[in-house]
Amino acid sequence: MTPTGPDDAFVADVLARTSGPACACARLILGGEIDEPLGAPERALVDGHLEHCAECRALADTLPSLHAELRALAERDPDAGFTARVLAATSGRPRRRAWHERWAARWAAAAARPRFAWEVAYALTLVLVLLVGDPLRAWDSAAARLHAWPAPTLEVRLPAPPGVANAGRRVTSRLDAAYQWLERRTEAVTMLLSSLRGDETARSSTWYAIADVTSRWARLALSWTRPLVDAFRPAPTEPPGGPVRSSDHTEMNR
Amino acid sequence: MADLDLGVLIARCQAGDELAWEAFVRRFQGRVYALACSYLDDRDEARDLAQEVFVRLYETRGRWAEAEGFVAWLCQVARNRAIDYQRRRRVRQPPRVVPEEQGVQVVDVSPGPAEQFEHRSRHRLVQAALARLSTLSREILTLRDVQELSVRDVATLLGIPAGTVKSRASRARVELAEEVLALGREQGQP
């Protein structure tokens, strides 16, 4: 604050020894006057300060004109050819689509390519291998697990109503024939596998593992179906003199 | 040429009307260029940036703001592009220092050559004073006083509270006035 009279010098001295000059406060209020008009008390106080402070008065005179000058800076002339250049740069330019539209279009274009199915298959196989591990190795452990699976015991007691017995026998005989065929094939495969068991190369091959699992499955199926087939098999004719008892066997063995 | 209603102009641009787009560019080129100049010192770079802003606007014309808050939104787009531009430039090459005489040309509507000269020198003085302010003060003044955005819009744009915008704007105006007075004294202007 620059003193302009004898009273001002006294006020300046007092302010210097107390709160300091009030110029900063007055200027801040003046700067904010553009956003919000001052209330009556602030107006009176600021006017009182301006009356005695030449620097703040000069600033207060500058602020409104400066504000008008700033508004004049809102637009600047780029040059004469600017519009033409913008129009040339945007002419025929397609509208930029939203991200989800671009994403959908990209996927549609990718899916339309002939090798997309192969790529998806590769990707899914890769995911499968990463998640599960080598899928072919599962055959080895499957065979071991299958071997440890015990065959259930099945007891069937079927009534033999008249008329159904003949049909049942026919079905049973065919089932029995199929069963025996399957048993022979399984036996052959098992024998083949047994002969290959010493061959490390053959044992480590996938085909060996598949054949092993297949034969084990077949044997498991046979052990499950055997009691069923036996249940339908006609009962053997009893020898004359009644059925053989266990005590008779004992006697015969003696 | 009478100014078309902004809402109609926006709708026509979005519908792909090339004439409306041309009118749009003519209407906002000064404002976008002025904004670009407030962020970049180099006149050519500011022009490139302004052009880039318009190309971007054209590409995204389906997603423009409503007419009511369009100017604030446009300022935000220009500001974002300017910040991107500055970032790219910082990576690419150091900024060029351009003499003040090559600075921007304000749209001048004063009639006589003497008045034009006076206006130009005064504008140059204000620009020089603006250049001396801190980045935040300059940006707040550019958005609030030059582009005349509302306090709320400036607060949203800069991501600061409205109260901070008001207090920073008050302080920035005082700083600018002090700089103008100081520069005027240095150059012997009133």
Image: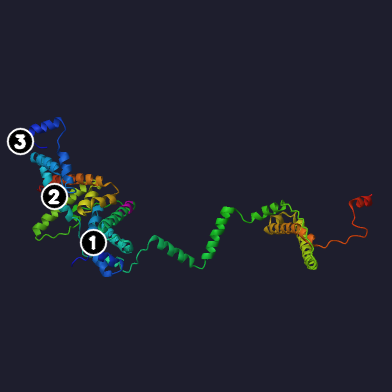
Residue A201 place in picture, x, y as percent: 70, 55
Q: Measure the C-alpha gap from mark 1 to mark 3.
A: 53 Å
Residue ranking furthest to the top:
A17
Residues tagged 2 and 3 counted as in contact (Cβ below 8 A): no
| Amino acid type, callout 2 | Pro
Q: Give the left or right position of residue A29, taking residue A222 as reference.
A: left
Residues tagged 1 and 3 counted as in contact (Cβ below 8 A): no
Mark 2: give few (<14), some (14-19) or many (20+) Cα within 10 Å.
Answer: some
Mark 3: give few (<14), some (14-19) or many (20+) Cα within 10 Å.
Answer: few
Name the mark on residue A30.
none
Residue A77 place in picture, x, y as percent: 20, 60
Residue under label 2, please give it.
Answer: A64
Q: Secondary structure at mark 1?
A: helix
* Chain containing mark 1: B
Residue under label 3, please give it.
Answer: A5
Q: Secondary structure at mark 2?
A: helix
Q: Nearer the viewer, residue A32 or B68?
A: B68
Residue at the image position 16 percent from the left and 42 percent from the top: A27
Q: Give the left or right position of residue A12, taking residue A200 as reference.
A: left
Residue under label 1, please give it.
Answer: B29
Q: Nearer the viewer, residue B82 or B89?
A: B82
| Amino acid type, callout 1 | Gln
| Amino acid type, callout 3 | Gly
Q: Which label lies toward us, 2 or 1?
A: 2
Q: Earlier in the sequence, mark 2 or mark 3?
A: 3
Quadrant in which residue A73 is drawn: bottom left
The magenta span reads B85-90
Q: Give the left or right position of residue B109, taking residue A83 as reference.
A: left
Q: Measure the C-alpha gap from mark 2 to mark 3.
A: 27 Å
Compared with B45, B189 (above or below) is above
1 and 3 marks on the same chain: no
